[in-house]
Image: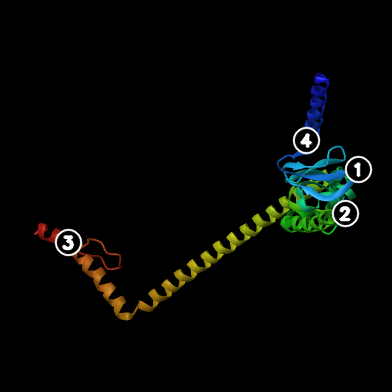
Amino acid sequence: MKYKKYVISGVIVAAALILGLASVTTVPSGYRGVLLQLGAVKPTIFDEGINFKIPFLQTVQPMEVRVQKEESSQTAASKDLQIVTTNVAVNYSLEPGSVNKLYQQIGMDYRSRIVEPAIAEALKAITAKYTAEELISKRPEVSNEVKNMLTTKLSKYYMKLEDINIKEFAFSEEFNKAIESKQTAEQNALKAKRDLERVKIEAQQQITQASAEAEALRLKKQEVTPELIQLKQIEVQQKAVEKWDGHLPSVTGGATPFIDFSTLEKKK
């Protein structure tokens, strides 16, 4: 009898211990616990940490509420019917206070059932509104429209869009060649325009210089007066006198011969 009491006591303690352990559950950091009672979703949501439940009747399904990342690559047609492959990274999170509804309506495969299709639909819808060149030149605007559409779609299923990053727009090889040719043509046109402007400037500079020279010549002509001419003649005569050595020329350029008096004096 004595050992029987010990056995019974041991069984009771073990059962109590098992029940105690079974009634305690721990929700990891960054998660919320969806309480299930015999498979049915209960309104109670467990926060991270230690929580209590009814042993064997209730279970807890942890659901991550931290920011999650989904990368996707979608091919669609632009407004001008160019094939565009868009690589995008989407950050989203589950609404902590509604994880039980999400689990009840969607389940744990919400990523493949909701997130991925929503990204594909948003990208294709927005891509079709812009031409291929506009997707590049208006990238912030395109990203904002995709973000707004995704925000609306995910919010219907108790998810919050945190951010979106369009990593790349990839086009067909033919389109890339067309863009390259267009850029080359634009660069050549810009160079030709600059050359033309340079030629015009140089021509204008030559015209200005010629006008200045003509004006200077005109002013010089206005300065030439009879008095100035007479003064110049006097200056020339003075210089000639200064250079004369006192001897008269023996030959003149006229018809009358010039007599050399020095020769006559020697004859006498």
Q: Nearer the observer, disc 2 or disc 3?
A: 2
C-alpha gap between disc 2 and disc 1:
50 Å
Distance, label 2 to label 4, CA atoms, is: 65 Å
Q: Which mark is residue 81?
A: 2
Label 2–label 4 contact, CB within 8 A: no
Q: Label 4 is placed on what type of residue?
A: Gly
Viewer-proximal residue among 116 and 205: 116
Query: Could you say which disc has been placed on residue 39 in the image?
Result: 1
Q: Which is more N-terminal, label 4 or label 2?
A: 4
Q: Which mark is residue 247?
A: 3
- Label 4 secondary element: helix
Which residue is at the far bottom?
Answer: 226
Q: Residue at x 77, y 38 (%)?
A: 24
Say what amino acid the circle numbered 3 marks. His
Instruction: Looking at the image, tell me whether mark 2 or mark 1 is earlier in sequence order.
Output: 1
Expressed as whole percent of the image width and height from the top left, the position of residue 125 reads 86, 56
The vertical placement of 197 against 168, above or below, is below
Task: Report the disc number at residue 20.
Answer: 4
Callout 3 secondary element: loop
